[in-house]
Amino acid sequence: MSDAVATYGWPALLRTPLAATYAACSRWTISRAVREGKLMPAGRRGNSLVFEREELDRWMRGDRVDPQAPTLDRRRHESTESLAETMRRVRAAGARGRR
């Protein structure tokens, strides 16, 4: 675990390797859960999937995916700007908390 995580807590959005650390499993388990439709990524950042911490918590509890929730295919058609806006909001909230 990085010093930043230990100091500031877990970020709201986690890339696959950090999501695997958070969930105490391998990144392959995360990828398998996505393929099987048990875990929904929030989007992509580069070549890595990005997950909301709340979605990981839901998956770890064993709760089912909401059938009305947007799927990755539907999200793929949305603008990538929405993910960028979310990342900016999360960073801004984190910066406010560090002051």
Image: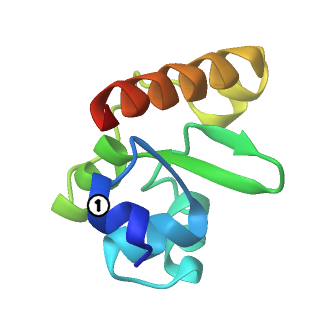
Left or right of 82? Residue 41 is left
How many residues crowd mark 1 within 10 Å: few (<14), some (14–19), many (20+)? Answer: few
Inspect this view and state whether residue 67 appears.
no
The location of residue 84, given as percent across then percent down, is: 69, 23
Left or right of 26? Residue 76 is right
Q: Residue at x 50, y 67 (%)?
A: 18
Q: Residue at x 72, y 43 (%)?
A: 44
Q: Residue at x 36, y 63 (%)?
A: 5
**Residue projecting furthest to the right:** 46
Residue 65 location, quadrant:
top left
Q: Secondary structure at mark 1?
A: helix
Q: Amino acid at mark 1?
A: Thr
Using the image as rendered, state which of residue 68 and residue 94 is in the foreground: 94
Picture layout, residue 10 above or below residue 74: below
Picture layout, residue 25 above or below residue 92: below
**Residue projecting furthest to the front:** 99
Q: Which residue is mark 1?
A: 7
Quadrant occupied by the N terminus: bottom left
Using the image as rendered, state which of residue 46 and residue 89 is in the foreground: 89
Picture layout, residue 84 above or below residue 15: above
